[in-house]
Image (spheres, rainbow, N blue to C red):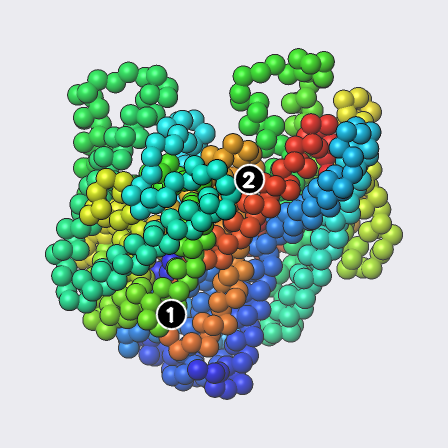
Amino acid sequence: MPPESQEDMGQLTYAQLIFSAQAVTRTRAFFWLVSLLLASLIWFISVHLSDREDAKLQYGLLIFGAAVSVLLQEAFRFAYFKLLKKADEGLATISEDGRSPISLRQMAYVSGLSFGIISGVFSVINILADSIGPGIVGIHGDSPYYFITSAFLTMALVLLHTFWGVIFFDACEKRRYWCLGLVVASHLLTSGLTFLNPWYEASLVPIFIITLCTGLWAFVTAGGSYRNVLKCLSCKGDAGQGGVYNGEGALVLFWWVSVPF
Amino acid sequence: MITFMNNSDSEEEPCNERTSLMSAESPPVPSYQDGLQASEAGEAQAHRKRRTGSSRSPNNIADGDTSDSGVPVRESALENEEEELTLKYGAKHVIMLFVPVTLCMIVVVATIKSVRFYTEKNGQLIYTPFSEDTPSVGQRLLNSVLNTIIMISVIVVMTVFLVLLYKYRCYKFIHGWLILSSLMLLFLFTYIYLGEVLKTYNVAMDYPTLFLVIWNFGAVGMICIHWKGPLQLQQAYLIMISALMALVFIKYLPEWSAWVILGAISIYDLMAVLCPKGPLRMLVETAQERNEPIFPALIYSSAMMWTVGMAKPDTAARGPSQQTWDAAEDGRENHRSPLHADSQMSETRSPVPTRPITSFEELEEEERGVKLGLGDFIFYSVLVGKAAATASGALYVSGLLTISPFLFSSLWQGLCLTLLLLAVFKKALPALPISITFGLVFYFSTDNLVRPFMDTLAFHQLYI
């Protein structure tokens, strides 16, 4: 039965918007997965089209595949941002006071975190599964610190994704494209540094430095400042860290819970 | 099948619903007319993640509706709060269903990875007579398709049989059937499972202890599922039997047949629930006409229901969804049993009247609950378990499949919402199709494309 009145249509659109917003927010992790899928498809094709025996070529193709994957991830992050913006605008127009119920800042943080978590999961879960089984690390001459460095690298990557998410969304909002370029460049740099493994001094240390710097940058971007931190520590008011979350405590809590998706 | 269960006051105070409907006529709130109830309900549904399987009883528009009319839709100023509630409850329901299904999948994957019994090929069910040990690929494909056809037709026949039984009011027969099947599941399959686990870990157990353990487990399970019991215990039992069933499927279905059957089941689910002459839908409609919940379903519910007033729309609402799922389950169940065709899976539904008494107090706290048919649990777990069982099943493939139904269910709901809004009545919707489709797509693509890529990257300890 078709909608019977104008208000009917309004309700329909409203409900549709709510649902599409929910759908968008719930499929965060899949954006990353689709980017991974496309990148691996490209790598797979390139490997099959090339000479399998040539180790150097294969390594080069791997580097190429990794670079493509990084670029695709950022592209999908941008796509997610666009989608979110659309849903946000739609909700804002429908809602009575022109303000949409979802806060873009929160969404930036959450989207970064979910990208990070799913990327971390994919990177580390096989290693974790293998670490249960019997075996000796590095018996063939590789580094015996494989597991611990993997753990630290994954942690750094998860944090980096979160920070990049915040910076990225903010840069897109304010149309500061040099920030975007910097984010992409730092992602490429981080990924490139991991190619220096197992020379861990050259890869782990710079990556952690990058993580710290990006963290500070994200903190400042999100509106944080020294005073905010002091206020937060002295438990005065509801100034959260860098204004990433505002006073809507319950909403924040449930966003935390729904974060991995 | 996903249904939305709502502890609304609708049963007890039908007039409340009316008054709330009427008072909502003032602008700017959309006025409540009869035709608008659907969209209002739709909007109410917008606040829930799951669709409701409510009946068409005149007192009740939708489970979701009534309590939602309590939500201040009337005031535009309160819309923000409402939106927050929407998002809040949407997330809450994902969690409520995510945890049990994930638990089931984790149990299945853990068992598959550790107990070798379930990955050994020890024959096949009689429902999949064609062997897959053929030399050529084409022959193998043909055999798996034939197996699927046989399996699905058995399911259809059993479902139709169940519908007929229901139509002609052979309730005793159905009850007996269900009790028999749950008996078999709780005792026999658990015994086999326990035996295999003990064998794997080389733990000795004497028969008296074994008897004691199995007897207690089974007896408590029967009571919890068919009669009264604490909600958490009942949920735990439902999860356990779903996992057991999924393990049986994984063991006895040959490789390719399993994948084709999964695909076919989701298509069947879609058709059986949505087509006008589909058996499940007929079951639902018959139950609605009679305004009674016939089968206490083997449906996992995250909250207890307001079934106090028995003859109330709530129970009627619960009934159809249960039945719909039920019939499908019953159908599938029959084949699953490798031993006796007669026994049904424990689609035990506790007789509805007994349930509310124990859970009266709990109802006050539970605001809105969600229900998911156990068949959905089982087939998701089969998907994930098969992925884990195949030799190249990397862990994240299984993990990915664990998350995928939930991620895509939101897409599915988004797609369905328009349908729902335009429909006058709400109905239970199949949960399988989109989730399984995406699960399958992702499984095959991840296994063949992503896994080599990630493995090579991990080998060099590269991160992307």
Q: Considering the numbered disc 1 on the image, is that residue within a helix, a strand or a loop?
A: loop
Residue A15 in view, yes or no:
yes
- Tell me the kind of residue under disc 2: Val
Q: Residue at x 38, y 40 (%)?
A: B131
Of B260 and A258, nearer the camera is B260
Residue B203 circle label: none
In which quadrant will I find the N terminus of chain B? bottom left
- Tell me the kind of residue under disc 1: Cys
Q: Is residue B254 left or right of residue B209?
A: right
Q: According to the image, label 2 marks what residue?
A: B397
Q: Considering the numbered disc 2 on the image, is that residue within a helix, a strand or a loop?
A: helix
Q: Chain of mark 2?
A: B
Give residue B320's position: percent from left, percent from top: 29, 64
Image quarter of residue A234: top right
Instruction: Find the distance from the CA under tag 1 to the CA under tag 2.
Output: 34 Å
Q: Residue at x 47, y 60 (%)?
A: B49
Image position of B45 with respect to B34: above or below: above
- The answer to whether dots 1 and 2 both sit on one chain is yes
Image quarter of residue B322: bottom left
Q: Residue at x 76, y 22 (%)?
A: A198
Q: Chain of mark 1?
A: B
Give residue B13's position: percent from left, percent from top: 27, 71
In which quadrant will I find the C terminus of chain B? top right
Image position of A126 with respect to B407: above or below: above
Of A107 and A261, nearer the camera is A261
Image position of B56 with respect to A78: above or below: below
Image position of A64 with respect to A145: above or below: below
Q: Residue at x 55, y 45 (%)?
A: B443
Mark 1 or mark 2, whichever is nearer to me: 1
